[in-house]
Amino acid sequence: MPDRFDLPAGFRWGAATAAYQIEGAVTEDGRGPSVWDTFAARPGAVRDGHTGAVACDHYHRHPEDIALMRGLGLDGYRFSVAWTRVLPTGSGAVNAAGLAFYDRLVDALLEAGITPLPTLFHWDLPQGLEDGGGWLNRDTAYRFAEYAGIVADRLGDRVPAWITLNEPFVHTVFGYALGTHAPGRTLMFEALPAAHHQLLGHGLAAAVLHDRGLDVMLSNNLTPVEPASPAPADVAAAEAYDALHNRVFTDPVLLGRYPGLAALGVPDDLYGAVRPGDLDLIHTPGLDGLGLNFYNPTRIAAPTGPGGLPFDFAEWPDAPRTAFGWPVVPEALTRLLLSLRDTYGKALPPLTITENGCSVDESTTPDQPRIDFMSAHLDALAHATTEGIDVRGYYAWSLLDNFEWAEGYHQRFGLVHVDFATCERTPRASYGWYRDLIAAHRAKRAVR
C-alpha cells in the first residue's frame, strides 16, 4: 500500500455529525417536531427508550465543539440543518430563531478557519410533512426545494458547497420498507416511491442551489456487493441487490435513468411514482461532487426458500467486526472507488468520503480499533488515488459520540467521548491520532 499521507494536493480533512444525533434542544426556539421525535417516543422503537431530546446538547455547546474541531486542525465540518428549526411544520412561515442558530454556527466555524459543509436532509423530516404522507407524497420534494432556497439565501454568502440528501437508501429501506427507523413504515419494495421523491427533491433543490451559484453534492451510502460464490444464482442475487442498494440512488443522478429492477419484481415506474420529465429534473442540474459514506462491503447469496426477498445476506468470511457487527474490509473501499469509475466513467464527478468510521465497545476494548479502522481505510483511499480516482477529502464519522438512531446511545463512533449524563466531552486516543495525521500530511505537502 502507498504511504497514507500520499494524498492529492488540496485534500481536505474533516469530521461529520448530524442534527438530530447531536443538537438536542428539540423544543427550544420554535423548533417543530420531526419524525425522529415521534418515532423515538414510540415504546420499543429505540433501544432502551433513548431519544435525541438532549443528545450531546450541541445546540448550546457548539462553541466547545468548534474548539475541538480547531484542535484537530480540520479543514471542514460536515453537519446537517434541522429542517424543523427553519420551517417547524416543513413549510409556511420561517422560524427566525432556527436560522439564527445556523448563522452563528457558520460564523463561528469560519472564524476558526473551518469550512462548513451543510447537509440539508439527514433523515429528520418535519412531522407536519409526514402527516401528509412524507416522502411517499410527491409534494414533499417541492417543499424540500423551497426549504433549500430559504437556507441558501441566508447562508450561501458564506457556504460555497451543499449536500442535499444523506443516504437516501438507508432512509428509504429502514424508514419506509422495514420500519426500523423513523417514520416506521413497513412497505417493503412499495417504499420505493419514497426513494424517487427524495431524488426528485434532490434534483429540484440542486437547481435552486445552482441558481444561487452554489456547488451541490449528494451523499450516498454505497457498498461493494459481492456474490457468496461464483454460482449463477448467487451472482444474479448480488446483481439485484447492487441495483437496489447502489444504482437506484446513483444512476438517476449521474446517468438520467433507473437500473432495471425486474429481478426484484419492481415495475420500471416504481409503482407509479416516476412521471414524464422526472428523470430530467433529477439528472439535469448535475453534481459538483459525489459524497460517499463507506462502512463495509456486502456479501449476497441466492435465497434459500420460496417467497420473500430475491437475495439473502451472507457472512463475510474471516473479517473482524465493529461493535455494530459490521465486517471490517478496508480494501473493499478501493474496489468500490474503482468500480464507480468503471461504471460511470466521465459522468462521475469528484468524490469526497463524507463518512467513514466505526463503533467500538469500550467496555471490552480500548480505542485502538477505531485508529486501526481509520488508518486502514485511509491506506485504501490513498491506493485508489494512485489509480487515478479523484477523491477530494475525508470526513471522519463522527466528531462526537451521539444518538445512534434505533441503537440510542449504545454505539459509540466519536473521536470524542461524550458522557450522556453530563454532556462532558473527552477526546479519545483516536482524536490525537487524527490530529497528528492531519498535521503530518500538511507538513509533508508544505515541503514539496
Image (cartoon, grey):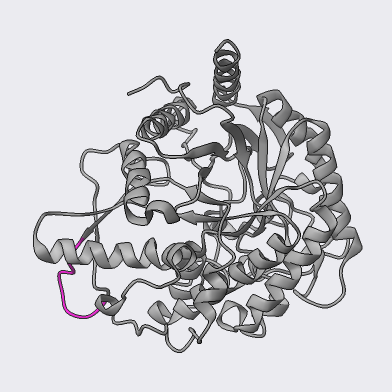
Residue at 73% over, 51% down: 23
Residue 231 in percent (x, y) is at: 8, 60
Q: In front: 158, or 314?
A: 158
Using residue 244 as the reference point, say whether residue 356 is left or right of it: right
Q: Quadrant of residue 27?
A: bottom right
Q: Residue at x 78, y 59 (%)?
A: 152
Decide if residue 186 is in sight here. no
Q: In this image, 128 relative to 359: left or right? A: right
Relative to residue 416, is residue 330 drawn left or right? left
Q: Residue at x 86, y 69 (%)?
A: 94
Q: Is residue 302 magenta?
A: yes
Dominant SS in magenta: loop
Q: Is residue 87 above or below residue 63?
A: below
Which quarter of the picture shows residue 107? top right
Q: Locate the N terminus by quadrant.
A: top left
What quarter of the picture does the C terminus occupy? top right
x, y (%) of residue 106?
80, 44
Residue at x 42% of width, y 52% of height = 346
108 lies above or below 406: above
Residue range in magenta is 301-308
Query: Which residue is at the far top?
Result: 447
Q: Is residue 291 left or right of residue 66?
A: left
Which residue lies most toward the right here? 96
**Residue situated in front as seen by the camera: 243 or 133:** 243
State the residue in front, 249 or 126: 249
**Furthest residue toward bottom:** 272
Coordinates of residue 201 in the picture (x, y in percent) = 61, 72
For residue 180: magenta?
Answer: no
